[in-house]
């Protein structure tokens, strides 16, 4: 195989070259068209014989004309200024632009596999010199352009292409795919997580949970369900939990507590357990589920020795057989709102919080206590590092139809007084519980949305069996 001439400088611009260069890095000159050094140089020293393979005679280099002034540079002679033959004996093209022929000119050699890698092996009359890519393995040829006259293949538009089944598309650009980390591969937009906004509706109960406007994740959770009592009558269940943000993995705690409490009620109520007792047992089951989250490997505790155990609050309600039962631990609440608004709206729970303790002790009135920065410091919660667990339960027999609003403090912070809650609940809440839960979540977001917001709306049908507390 013939070798490329070894040049130290570009014949065109005189820029230094490196070994193995096919083109000048400064001007792009095609170095493959440079003929070998002549046998006899202008100074009489021996060199290689141009055209020796064809038996040609040595050629004399033309003498550069002298100039009158040293300010004028000496003209440079290019290799193409000399006539000559290639190694096959054919005449080299005399056009000065032969070395800069278009890169897409078709080679004269019909079989590319047998073509020589340099200019000396080109067939006579070839108009372009195409080095073999195998000479320089670091060079990667570009794909050939479409043949003239052939129709161009249009590129597929990613916005209109049909993605494979099950592919998640970005909610922002509507075209990029979502990677496993939850970000769009196209625009990089973070996608909403499943728990950022949740809604569920059954025939007789509905719930909505939203991350809010300030938190980076939703640490609330809810569970709603229905069960059949032994006599065949329905029982409607709503459980709402609020993760304690200062604890470890509060989102996991709230989810574990809602599931455990709901599962417990779905087992005990059909068995004939009294709803109030069933609620008590459900809170204990939720506490066990949250406590189990604290059972971390010893190595995890070594790396994070100052983390609190997972914790959350809980509030739940059961509507069954004309009875309304509530249970809670922490500062999540339940409100009774009558349909006709003629009866009083009542808060059915008492917070396990610093503010509630101050009011109960008579040290502050409610307005003063909840204005204090310590107001929302809870004194009761579900978790391995909680104080002695004291589940609260109560049962009522309302004397009229209404709805039970079961919520976290993400809502009642914006409707704390019972009158404010009554005004926020839509008049048709009993007929449209999902819409009412959506309205209440919107009320909190419109108020600032500083916390996660979770609301369950449970209609209570009136059963004329008397009134009063059980």
Image: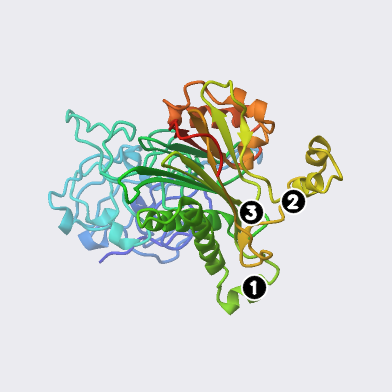
- Front one among 56 and 87: 87
Where is residue 404 drawn, in percent x and y?
A: 52, 35
For the point 59% across and 79% down, the residue is 298
Can you tell which mark lies on residue 303?
1
Query: Element under label 1?
Result: helix
Can you tell which mark lies on residue 328?
none
Is residue 183 found left or right of 381 in the rendered image? left
Residue 186 shows in the view: yes
Residue found at the far bottom of this picture: 298
Is residue 75 found left or right of 309 in the rendered image? left
Q: Using the rendered view, name the quadrant where residue 263 is placed.
A: bottom left
Report the mark closest to the observer, 2 or 3: 2
Q: Count up the numbered dots.
A: 3
Where is residue 73 drawn, in percent x and y?
A: 59, 41
Query: Element under label 3?
Result: loop
Question: What crowding class fits label 3: few (fewer than 14 Cα within 10 Å), some (14-19), or many (20 or more)?
Answer: many
Q: CA distance from mark 3 to mark 1?
A: 21 Å
Residue ID for mark 2: 377
For the point 35% across and 49% down, the residue is 229
Report the mark closest to the observer, 3 or 1: 3
121 relative to 335, above or below = below
Q: Earlier in the sequence, mark 2 or mark 3?
A: 3
Question: What crowding class fits label 2: few (fewer than 14 Cα within 10 Å), some (14-19), or many (20 or more)?
Answer: some
- Front one among 387 and 50: 387
Residue ID for mark 3: 244
For the point 42% across and 53% down, the residue is 180
Scheme of image coloration: rainbow
Q: CA distance from mark 2 to mark 3?
A: 10 Å
Query: Element under label 2?
Result: loop
Question: What crowding class fits label 1: few (fewer than 14 Cα within 10 Å), some (14-19), or many (20 or more)?
Answer: few
For the point 57% across and 22% down, the residue is 341
């Amino acid at each position: 195989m013939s070798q490329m001439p070894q040049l130290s400088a570009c014949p065109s611009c005189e820029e230094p070259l490196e070994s193995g260069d096919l083109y000048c890095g400064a001007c792009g000159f095609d170095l493959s068209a440079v003929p070998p050094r002549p046998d006899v140089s202008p100074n009489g020293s021996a060199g290689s014989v141009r055209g020796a393979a064809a038996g040609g005679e040595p050629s004399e280099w033309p003498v550069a004309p002298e100039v009158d002034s040293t300010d004028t540079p000496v003209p440079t002679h290019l290799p193409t200024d000399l006539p000559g033959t290639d190694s096959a004996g054919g005449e080299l093209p005399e056009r000065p632009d032969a070395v800069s022929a278009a890169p897409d000119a078709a080679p004269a050699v019909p079989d590319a596999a047998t073509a020589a890698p340099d200019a000396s092996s080109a067939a006579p009359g070839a108009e372009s010199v195409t080095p073999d890519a195998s000479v320089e393995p670091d060079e990667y040829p570009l794909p050939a352009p479409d043949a003239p006259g052939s129709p161009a293949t249009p590129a597929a538009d990613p916005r209109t292409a049909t993605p494979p089944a099950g592919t998640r598309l970005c909610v922002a650009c509507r075209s990029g795919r979502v990677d496993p980390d939850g970000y769009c591969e196209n625009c990089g937009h973070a996608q909403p997580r499943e728990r950022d906004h949740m809604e569920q509706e059954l025939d007789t109960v509905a719930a909505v949970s939203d991350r809010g406007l300030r938190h980076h994740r939703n640490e609330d959770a809810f569970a709603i369900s229905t069960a059949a009592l032994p006599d065949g009558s329905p029982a409607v269940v709503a459980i709402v939990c609020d993760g304690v943000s200062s604890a470890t993995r509060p989102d996991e705690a709230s989810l574990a507590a809602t599931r455990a409490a709901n599962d417990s009620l779905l087992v005990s109520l059909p068995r004939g357990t009294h709803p109030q007792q069933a609620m008590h047992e459900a809170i204990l089951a939720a506490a066990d589920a949250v406590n189990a989250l604290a059972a971390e490997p010893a190595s995890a505790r070594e790396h994070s020795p100052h983390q609190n155990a997972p914790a959350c609050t809980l509030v739940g309600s059961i509507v069954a057989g004309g009875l309304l039962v509530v249970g809670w631990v922490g500062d999540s609440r339940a409100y009774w709102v009558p349909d006709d608004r003629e009866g009083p709206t009542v808060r059915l729970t008492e917070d396990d919080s610093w503010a509630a303790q101050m009011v109960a002790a008579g040290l502050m009135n409610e307005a003063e206590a909840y204005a204090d920065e310590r107001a929302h410091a809870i004194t009761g919660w579900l978790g391995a590092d909680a104080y002695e667990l004291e589940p609260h339960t109560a049962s009522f027999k309302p004397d009229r139809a209404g709805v039970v609003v079961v919520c976290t403090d993400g809502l009642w912070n914006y409707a704390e007084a019972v009158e404010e809650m009554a005004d926020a609940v839509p008049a048709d809440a009993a007929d449209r519980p999902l819409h009412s839960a959506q309205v209440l979540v919107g009320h909190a977001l419109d108020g600032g949305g500083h916390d996660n917001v979770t609301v369950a709306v449970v209609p209570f049908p009136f059963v004329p069996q008397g009134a009063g507390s059980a």
